[in-house]
Image (tube, helix red, strand yellow):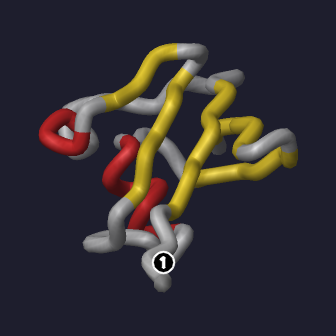
Amino acid sequence: MLQLTINGEPRQLAGPASVQDLLVDMALAGKRVAIERNGEIVPRGLHAATPLADGDVLEVVVAVGGG
């Protein structure tokens, strides 16, 4: 189990896992999101290739459209 902090809240995720796996787990796959992992932005093209590690701190921001 990975112990993560996401948007300031503790969360567990079965490991090994990537940023993409986390988005699937959070039901955010395919949505417009910005991910910051340990203070660095993870580009969308690297979500599947970016592994998560125990203790990672992530900020997940979902883009919301409107008018």
Mark 1 is on which residue type? Answer: Ala
Q: Nearer the viewer, residue 15 or 26?
A: 26
**Residue 52 percent coordinates (x, y):** 46, 31
Q: Which residue is mark 1?
A: 27
Q: Is residue 37 left or right of residue 42?
A: right
SS type, badge 1: loop
**Nearer to us in this view, 3 or 45:** 45
Position of 1 with respect to 45 (left or right) is right
| Position above or below: 67 against 49 | below
Q: Is residue 37 above or below residue 7?
A: above
Left or right: residue 64 versus residue 45 is: right
- Percent coordinates x, y for residue 4 in the rendering: 70, 37
Estimate how packed mark 1 is, as few (under 14), some (14 to 19) or many (20 or more) residues with alpha carbons within 10 Å: few
| Residue sitting at x 27%, y 72% | 30
Q: Residue at x 49, y 44 (%)?
A: 15
Check the picture and name the quadrant holding the N terminus.
top right
